[in-house]
Image (cartoon, helix red, strand yellow):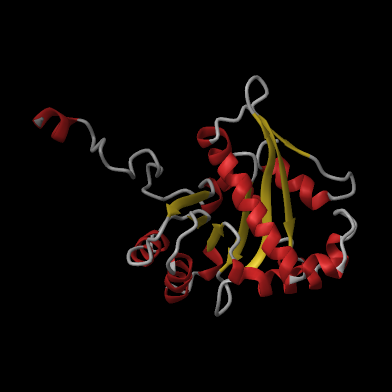
Amino acid sequence: WLYLLLARGGFWRATVGDWDDAGTPPLSGAWPDVIAIVPARDEAQVIGACVRSLLAQDYPGAFRVVVVDDDSSDATSARAHEAARLMHAEERLVVLRAPRARDYEAWRQLRRESREFLKPYEPRWTEADLNRQAFGARLIRGRKEAKRGTDFSFLIFDATGPQEALVGGLTVSNIRRRAAQHANLGYWMGAPFAGRGLMTEAVGTLLPFYFETLHLHRLHAAFLPHNIASRRVLEKNGF
């Protein structure tokens, strides 16, 4: 132990090898981007402390926190957003969770104001597809499909405003088992939030869920040739 302590150059120190001989840390661009993923269910009492602790890290590179709210029945996601606001770090927190009935108004408003933005890339839909009954049927169908293990849907929330804001959604669908072990990935982003990298982070966050939890072998994703933003999302995630 004395040999390790005195003669090995402080090998246990995280700074060794990270700085040059002059004791200067690398430029910020030399540090890889890091995303801390926090799975949570009914963690309202402790999620705030967890988020604050992560956001307080002095990592020199780009660092963000993604909370995956696993259908909590309490205020887990709200407490996470509150913690980010207290740290003045709202732009570094994203929350993913399954849709709920109380999301209807935000969902309808975002889909409605993004109609022209999404029109070139989605199947045709009408105002009737935005009513409360259609949204309720979507929730019921989604929960049944999730229980069967054939489809999983998530909504994406951003914390940069005074309240959490719905920014988009993504779905893994048509899951095939046995020899196939593959599924289809789809996603949509609201017009006011496009171009901020939120969907790239959301897709990247859920890849371990698809491959390690669902044990898929392949994930298929298609985009229209002129949808450059969607192409970048996939390229940045290794597709």
Q: Nearer the viewer, residue 40 or 103?
A: 103
Quarter of the N terminus within the rendering: top left
Residue 53 appears anywhere in the view: yes
Can you tell which quarter of the image residue 73 is in?
Answer: bottom left
Residue 22 vs residue 96: left or right? left
Residue drawn at 53 percent across, 45 percent down: 32
Residue 201 appears anywhere in the view: no
Residue drawn at 67 percent across, 48 percent down: 171
Q: Position of residue 2 (x, y in %)?
A: 9, 31
Quarter of the C terminus within the rendering: top right
Q: Position of residue 116 (x, y in %)?
A: 88, 67
**64 vs 49: above or below:** above
**78 vs 233: above or below:** below
Q: Position of residue 213 (x, y in %)?
A: 51, 36
The total number of labels drawn is 0
Can you tell which quarter of the image residue 110 is in?
Answer: bottom right
Q: Residue furthest bottom?
A: 162
Residue 47 vs residue 231: left or right? left
**190 vs 141: above or below:** below
Q: Position of residue 104 (x, y in %)?
A: 66, 70
Q: Residue furthest top?
A: 179
Q: Residue furthest left?
A: 2
